[in-house]
Image: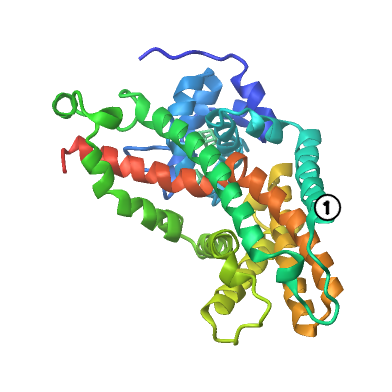
Amino acid sequence: MGTTVDPDLLLNLKKFGVEDAGICFNCGNCTAVCSLSTEMIPFPRKVIRYLQLGAKDKLIQSPEPWLCYYCGDCTETCPRQANPAEVMMGVRRYLTTQYDWTGISRLFYTSKIFEFFAIFLVAALVGLGFYAYHGPMLTDRVALNVFAPNTVIEILDLIMLGVLSFFLLSNGYRLFSAVMGDPGQYPPLSSSARQQFQNRLLKGIPVLLYIKEARGFVTHFFTQKQFGACGTHTQRVQWFMHLLIMTGYTIIFMLVVVGIRWFQRDEIYAIWNPVRLLGYYSTFAILYGTTYAIVGRLQKSKTVFEHTHSSDWIFLIMLWLTTFSGILIHATRLLEWPLTTYYLYVIHLMIAVPMLVIEVPFAKWTHQLYRPLVQYLIQIKEKAMKAEY
Ligand code: SF4
Ligand code: SF4
């Protein structure tokens, strides 16, 4: 299959944090040390080669960037200081913008002005919405559901969920089309398998196989088990922190977006109530995980913390602030400080909503979907190659 050459590819990737790929002399050390690289899917050298050659099509169709968990081993052993781990991270940012059809992701990653403007705009809309439409502010008790009825918040949440899902899933479909789109790309189907799959749906592979393998997607999504396969103790700590943030984030997202009628109540649940316990777990998991990542990046304590793109800072800081303001609301509710609770609630949403609206479909959060999706697609292709269905 022909490849379109983009001579500016390497230059364009600089905006996404890829600084040193040009000095790589393709020795292959990085691929040899990467514990996630396999004979069938070798990386990161191959991805760097695509950049050097300007092979944009191949890069967009490449599953490899989503298989890297940014452990940093390859960077530590690179004789040219080409920083392959950071290259893989930058490529993931770039690919996120390529799969996003709206162009918002590209603006977000390449313009700090847009980054701050978009966050400020959504935050201002949330603040103005509360200013204009909030309910009575009772001061004899904390009555959050009078100030902001959970029935109204629920409707707004569901609208937001629908819109975010539309953008995220349509972008995810573009990734799916790219990764499954090129029969010459990894892993190539054998000619007999290709013959068998002629006239089948979904990129030449039977729909039944996608359904049968769906469990693999769920497993990768919730356990990040591929990351756990990275060998050293330090990498296992990284995996655990990543898992904490991911599970905490997913649980709290479900509680506040889908389960708000149970989560936002004026009566205080008993300590052993499952909703309260899930809330505590999420709070602890996100706060611990994000604090670890922020402190590590400030101290540059590991290879993977040495370079931080502005979009990473924004994601971590907004997630941390959302969690911290959530803790303050809980505290002021327990202390029975009504006015402080209402103001904190508005501030909390002015941080949380922009984070969700921008991060989920267009920025850092997308990898929560893209990583397990690519692992699932590879699993399907491997089964299809062996005609195991
Ligand atoms: S990134 Fe470094 S280790 Fe990897 S192929 Fe290039 S020079 Fe070798
Ligand atoms: S950062 Fe780790 S997982 Fe990613 S390519 Fe390098 S060694 Fe492999």
Q: Is residue 135 above or below residue 179?
A: below
Q: Is 294 situated above or below 165? A: below
User: Does any portion of residue 51 appear in the rendered image?
Assistant: yes
Can I make out residue 44 in this image? Answer: no
**For residue 229, side relative to residue 297 (left or right):** left
**Residue in the foreground of this view, choosing between 20 and 147:** 147
**Which type of secondary structure does the marked residue at label 1 adopt?**
helix
* Vertical placement of residue 100 versus 293, above or below: above
Q: Nearer the viewer, residue 47 or 107?
A: 107
Q: Read off the residue under disc 1.
A: 132
Residue 89 vs residue 256, the one in the foreground? 256
Q: Residue 6, located in which quarter of the rendered image?
A: top right
In the visual, does 341 lie left or right of 12? right
Q: Is residue 73 left or right of residue 189?
A: right
Amino acid on which disc 1 is placed: Ala
> Quarter of the image containing the N terminus?
top left
Which image quadrant: the C terminus?
top left
Which residue is drawn at the image coordinates 59% and 31% (left, top)?
Answer: 97
Question: Does label 1 point to a residue whose CB lies under 8 Å from ligand 2?
Answer: no
Question: In x, y percent, where is residue 100?
Answer: 56, 31
